[in-house]
Amino acid sequence: MILCCAVTACKKNNVDFSFSPANPRAGETVSFSNLSESGEEWNWSFGDGATMTLKSPTHTYKQPGTYKVTLQVDKKSSWSATKEITIYDTIPTFACEDTEFVIYKDYTFNAVVYNPYNYEVTYEWSLPDGSDYAVVTDTTMKKSSLHLYFTKAMNAAPIQLRVVVNGIETIAKKTFTVSDQKTHSILLRTPDGDFRQRIFGDRAEKALPVSSDTTAKRLLDKEQDTLQTYNGREFRLDSLAGVYTGMKGFHIASRKIYYRAEGLWVANIDGSYRVQIDTTACEVMTLDTKDNRIYWANKNGVWYMPFVGTDNNRFVTVPVQLNSLTNAEKITADNTNQ
């Protein structure tokens, strides 16, 4: 009986544990494996104030440093084991100040790298599933920050960062939920059908067919640029054509009249200071008073520019091409926020 008890005590005294990974970093999950041959109760102390009573727990250290980890079996001080664990610099990752993401809004993602010893660091960002869901606005993807905007609503849009610190490589990959957002649109009618192109500030989605869009059909069916009411006064194409030579259509906003003749023109409402905006024949045009822009179509596609703001109608901004749809028959703005 004495011999049996001695053997049992010896077994119970054989308290041991291991952990992995061997060189953990702050923020990384460390797994502790209980190697004790016997016991029923377990008390772990991880050296940073945290404790646990699982047989083989996991723990995450928030700060680098060296900690003493103690495992005590069955609450007996003599049945315990203590080992030191060194937690190295935090695992490189990245973050964004924004927590909610929508399409066509600018976002900045910043690398988070703990590097107190000023080791050499290299960065390499990537969009793992291709680039159809985001546009990078940086000239390079090898800086500590990444600037982009999303172009498609997704439940899990991935972004990846490869960081090399002192020759040690870490891959950080995160996914983000990207939501759609409502905005106004430009509607176009061509021989190939009706199209809607949503506008997001200086950016726009691809023009998409809208065959079943009743709002688009109603707006495009209206007479476009032959009759305008401005400040309670009615302006008609037939009465203005004698003043503005070759006028085929017009729109009025902010004391300016924009009209298509041989190209696209702008003048003051009294007809003074006529300035040609585009020399290419203008097929159709419209004004978007929400964004204060003029849109027009020529043989090369659809263009836009801000309203002209000077009294003499000289402008410094240049036209920007919106799309390459040709043979437009009608164009109008829809500010109903689709």
Image (cartoon, rainbow, N blue to C red):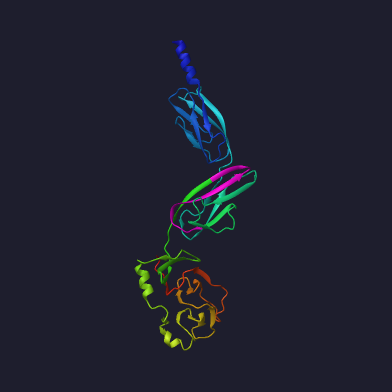
The furthest residue to the bottom: 242
From this viewpoint, is residue 256 visible? no
Q: Quadrant of the C terminus?
A: bottom left
Please state the extent of the stretch shown in magenta in the rendering. Answer: 149-171
Identified at 43% across, 10% down, the residue is 1
The reply to whether residue 176 is visible in this rendering is: yes
Left or right: 310, with 101 as reference point: right
Q: Could you say where residue 237 lies in the image, as x and y percent from the top left? A: 43, 84
Can you say whether 303 is above or below 75 in the image?
below
Predominant secondary structure in magenta?
A: strand
Position of 23 relative to 75 (above/below) = below
Magenta-drawn stretch contains 162: yes
Residue 211 lies, in percent from the top left, at: 36, 67
Give whichever of 243, 110 is nearer the camera. Answer: 243
x 48%, y 19%: residue: 11
Question: Is 52 above or below relative to 170?
Answer: above
